[in-house]
Image (cartoon, rainbow, N blue to C red):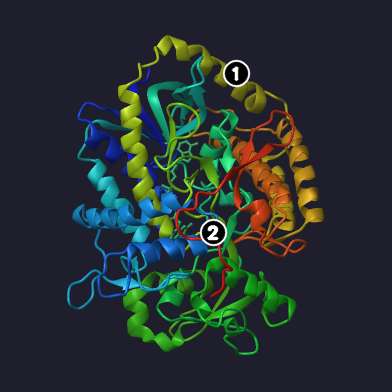
């Protein structure tokens, strides 16, 4: 069966993918979009975002676009491209207001104005929220808006395995398995937008949903597109031990304390000016120091500190952060109204991703990317909480609009030209995964990957452990060649998709570890215990990791764009 062709194929039905789809069909009334997602769109990870989305919408908060830009750039440890950040803060505001018009129920103050709350590293209250279920409401507003357009055709529960490139190296569609039937199809397109989210699942302990395996990054990487700034992985300071379930930063934005086993608000030692509202990289590192000093609690799932919300009182907790109460009651049997909540740092977000320009365009003609999977780059070495929900709106829209322009100047690839590519891809999957008589188990390789990433590329890194991780990943890739998929059925073969996802994890893990090994400085989330200082002379630049079949990735560098904020010491 041939799948209909589309002017634009979007991979990913989360916030970025839906925003890109709406932007594309609104930009041109003749454009058709295929929206492919491995899960039903409302199950995308965006749904689980809690705390809020940043934007300058209030005129009574001593705020300005420049201040939002500066906070973002300082938060990034001066690695963000400043021209991109300037465009971002301006359009974020407009996007958030538009989302209100599309039905997003932002929380409101008594006087009817949209509420804003404090967030880590932001100079003033500028994070819009819908209680602490912001992602759920944003994704709903985007999803229901997308339903207005019959030119957006959805392929729910289709797993994209490969980007297809034509003879000139331009994107010409994707290969995707319809998970319901198991059949692999080519979906031809003039342009492709990759919006597949992050890849926190390369680490064992993460807030990220199981589907966040970096598939799109891996596909783009294999197609020859570099992955930018992959060494920068964000730890969120407050996850529940054991599960990694997130206690939103809004709980500190609303006034929660972090307390060590001495009963002290220990951040006064590290971030006296910001306390619990310091940026995530610094608050997470403070935990490690407290751990070394023996100031943390010991529990069945390792060490932890307390997130104390009791002084906020029941009414405020129920009104502002009801989901926190729901989660702690259900997952650790604790009611935060009466007891402090155990928390510890947990892998949360990838600052790096598919290298794009300010419009979401990658170096591959016809290939665009937006959302967490892309690196545009506004986040640099450390993202500020609540910027990424705004980011996916701004760059989702930009990539959709620019993909339309590209598609309008491009011819549709003939279906026949894609057929042999799909046959090749089908054979690759059969030979490599389904009929290889392998002996290795998916879970074993994944668990060994987790161990080596945790040891080598965690909150603190150093030469020796990073080298060990870089040496271990090729061995895991060798073992992956012998991986066994025991379920050979075609209908909903989730073991097969898990095996494909493991391939993506291994690809992006090698870019994280190798980029981290070569960055001999500490900047933002990348803390080298052997190079403790930031080194602007040698490393005020982005890393670009290129795929290199059979060897380590090739790492190149790109200058950071500075408009008006010169790098300065980052103190809070
Ligand atoms: C628990 C949690 C809370 C957060 N809270 C906040 C917050 O309060 N504020 C904030 O700014 N940020 C927050 N973030 C970060 C933010 O939510 C994400 O960065 C953002 O939602 C990512 O959106 P996305 O559209 O890029 O990707 P996602 O929403 O992850 O969507 C990815 C899409 O790609 C599809 N896909 C992936 N691989 C394939 C494939 N192989 N084939 C087909 N489809 C594929 C998936 O099906 C999915 O539809 C939070 C993140 C987490 C994990």
How packed mark 1 is, by other alpha carbons closer than 10 Å (few <14, some 14-19, many 20 or more), is some
Residue at image mark 1: 427
Indicate the quadrant where residue 133 lies: bottom left
Q: Is residue 138 left or right of residue 388?
A: left
Q: Is residue 87 left or right of residue 352?
A: left
Percent position of residue 334, x then y = 50, 78
Q: Let me know if residue 239 appears in the view.
A: no
Q: Is residue 263 left or right of residue 171?
A: right
What residue is rendered at 74% in x and 61% in y?
Answer: 531
Indicate the quadrant where residue 508 lies: top right
Q: Earlier in the sequence, mark 2 or mark 1?
A: 2
Judge: label 1 CB < 8 Å from ligand 1. no
Q: Which mark is residue 461?
A: none
Percent position of residue 461, x then y = 73, 59
Give the mark toward the camera: 2 or 1. Answer: 2
What secondary structure is found at the residue carrying circle 2? loop
Q: Let me know if residue 242 appears in the view.
A: yes
Q: Which mark is residue 78?
A: 2
What secondary structure is found at the residue carrying circle 1? helix
What residue is rendered at 63% in x and 60% in y?
Answer: 523
Above/below status of 559 relative to 285: above
């Amino acid at each position: 069966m041939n799948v209909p062709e589309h002017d634009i194929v979007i991979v990913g039905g989360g916030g970025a993918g839906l925003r890109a789809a709406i932007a594309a069909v609104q930009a041109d009334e003749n454009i058709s979009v295929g929206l492919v997602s491995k899960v039903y769109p409302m199950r995308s990870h965006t749904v689980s975002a809690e705390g809020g989305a940043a934007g300058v919408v209030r005129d009574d908060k001593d705020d300005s676009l420049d201040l939002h830009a500066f906070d973002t750039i300082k938060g990034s440890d001066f690695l963000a491209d400043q021209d991109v950040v300037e465009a971002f803060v301006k359009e974020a505001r407009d996007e958030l207001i538009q989302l209100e018009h599309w039905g997003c129920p932002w929380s409101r103050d008594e006087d009817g104005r949209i509420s804003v709350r404090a967030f880590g590293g932001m100079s003033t209250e500028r994070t819009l929220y819908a209680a602490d279920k912001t992602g759920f409401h944003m994704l709903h507003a985007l999803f229901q808006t997308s339903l207005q357009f019959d030119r957006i055709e959805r392929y729910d529960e289709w797993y994209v395995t490969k980007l297809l490139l034509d003879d000139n190296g331009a994107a010409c569609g994707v290969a995707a398995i319809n998970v319901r039937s198991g059949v692999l199809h080519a979906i031809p397109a003039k342009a492709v937008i990759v919006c597949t989210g992050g890849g926190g699942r390369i680490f064992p302990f993460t807030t990220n949903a199981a589907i966040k395996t970096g598939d799109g990054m891996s596909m783009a990487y294999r197609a020859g597109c570099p992955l930018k700034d992959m060494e920068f992985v964000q730890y969120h300071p407050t996850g529940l031990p054991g599960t990694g379930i997130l206690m939103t930063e809004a709980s500190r934005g609303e006034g929660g304390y972090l307390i060590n086993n001495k009963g002290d608000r220990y951040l006064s030692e590290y971030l006296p000016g910001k306390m619990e509202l310091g940026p995530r990289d610094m608050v997470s590192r403070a935990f490690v120091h407290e751990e070394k000093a023996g100031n943390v609690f010991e529990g069945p799932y390792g060490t932890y500190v307390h997130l104390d919300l009791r002084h906020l009182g029941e009414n405020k907790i129920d009104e502002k952060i009801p989901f926190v109460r729901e989660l702690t009651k259900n997952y650790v049997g604790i009611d935060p109204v009466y007891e402090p909540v155990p928390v510890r740092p947990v892998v949360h977000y990838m600052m790096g991703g598919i290298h794009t320009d300010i419009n979401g365009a990658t170096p591959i003609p016809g290939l665009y990317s937006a959302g967490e999977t892309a690196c545009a780059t506004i986040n640099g070495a450390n993202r500020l909480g609540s910027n990424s929900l705004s980011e996916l709106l701004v760059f989702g829209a930009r990539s959709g609009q620019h993909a339309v322009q590209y598609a309008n100047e491009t011819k549709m690839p003939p279906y026949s030209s894609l057929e042999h590519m799909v046959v090749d891809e089908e054979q690759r999957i059969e030979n490599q995964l389904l009929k290889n008589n392998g002996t290795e188990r998916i879970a074993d390789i994944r668990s060994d990957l987790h161990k080596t990433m945790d040891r080598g590329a965690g909150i603190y890194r150093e030469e020796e452990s990073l080298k060990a991780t870089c040496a271990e990943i090729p061995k895991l890739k060798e073992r992956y060649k012998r991986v066994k998929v025991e379920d050979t059925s075609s209908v909903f073969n989730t073991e097969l998709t898990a095996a494909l996802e493991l391939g993506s994890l291994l690809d992006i893990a090698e870019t994280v570890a190798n980029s981290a090994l070569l960055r001999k400085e500490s900047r933002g989330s990348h803390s080298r215990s052997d190079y403790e200082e930031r080194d602007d002379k040698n490393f005020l630049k982005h890393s670009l990791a290129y795929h290199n079949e059979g060897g380590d990735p090739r790492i190149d560098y790109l200058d950071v764009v500075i408009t008006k904020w010169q790098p300065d010491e980052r103190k809070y």
